[in-house]
């Protein structure tokens, strides 16, 4: 049986923790997603960020695919990535992107998380939820932290809703 992997590189931009607060986030797909799926290549089910959400008629902010906020390549700790998703949480709301993964046959999610070099200084934390349950989270990461980026992997076997926060 072929294992499929959802690979994502998460870049969190700007400041504070995205547990329930923060300012800016990006996701970029890992370069070695062999037999995997880049989340930036598939449609999300919904998203919410910086007091905007996918159901708003004219959202002030929207997630972006494959670029930083300024349109350049996503860069973390000096390394650039061609693939990715960018979000923008704020102090009051986490940034969530929700995917329906039930039709993809994936059983592993991998991510490298860090703070996008385009943002202000600060720290962020990344969480992965499967069907509403927390299944993985990073430590606080940021350019001035001992961990400017963090690799994580978690099982998503049998799940249907993947939330990146």
Image (spheres, rainbow, N blue to C red):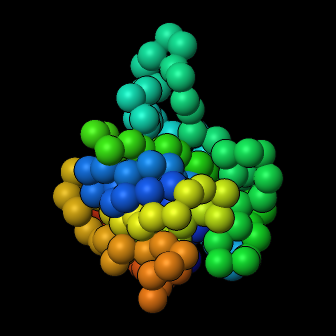
Percent across and percent down for residue 152 are: 43, 79
Tell me the quadrant of the picture where the C terminus can be found.
bottom left
Is residue 107 visible to us here?
A: no
Residue 47 vs residue 73, the one in the foreground = 73
x and y, in percent, of residue 22 in the image: 38, 52
Q: Residue at x 45, y 88 (%)?
A: 146
Total tally of numbered discs in the picture: 0
Is 64 on the left-hand or right-hand side of 106?
A: right
- Residue at point 52%, 64% (across, down): 121
Residue at 40 percent of width and 64 percent of height:
124
Q: Position of residue 102 (x, y in %)?
A: 41, 50
Q: Residue furthest bottom?
A: 146
Tell me which corner region of the image, top left, top right, bottom left or bottom right, holds residue 117: bottom right
> Looking at the picture, how far across and down is residue 120, in whole percent?
56, 57
Residue 103 left/right relative to 158: right
Q: Measuring 28% from the left and 57% from the top, which residue is drawn there? A: 19
Task: Tell me if 52 is positioned left or right of 87 in this view.
Answer: left
Q: Is residue 10 above or below residue 62?
A: below
Q: Foreground residue, 1 or 19?
A: 19
Residue that extends furthest to the top in the rendered view of this protein:
57
Toward which corner of the image does residue 83 lie, by quadrant? bottom right
Asked whether residue 121 appears in the rendered view, the answer is yes
């Amino acid at each position: 049986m072929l294992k499929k992997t959802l690979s994502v590189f998460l870049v969190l931009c700007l400041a504070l923790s995205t547990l329930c607060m923060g300012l800016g986030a990006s996701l970029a797909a890992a370069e070695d997603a062999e037999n995997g799926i880049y989340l930036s290549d598939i449609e999300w089910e919904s998203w919410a960020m910086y007091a905007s959400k996918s159901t708003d008629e004219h959202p002030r902010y929207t997630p972006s695919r494959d670029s930083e906020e300024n349109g350049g390549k996503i860069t973390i700790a000096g390394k650039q990535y061609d693939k990715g998703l960018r979000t923008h949480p704020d102090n009051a709301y986490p940034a969530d992107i929700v995917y329906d993964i039930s039709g993809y046959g994936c059983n592993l999610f991998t991510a490298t998380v860090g703070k996008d070099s385009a943002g202000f200084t600060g720290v962020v934390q990344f969480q992965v939820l499967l069907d509403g349950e927390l299944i993985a989270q990073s430590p606080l990461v940021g350019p001035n932290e001992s961990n400017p980026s963090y690799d994580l992997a978690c099982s998503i076997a049998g799940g249907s809703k993947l939330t990146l926060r």
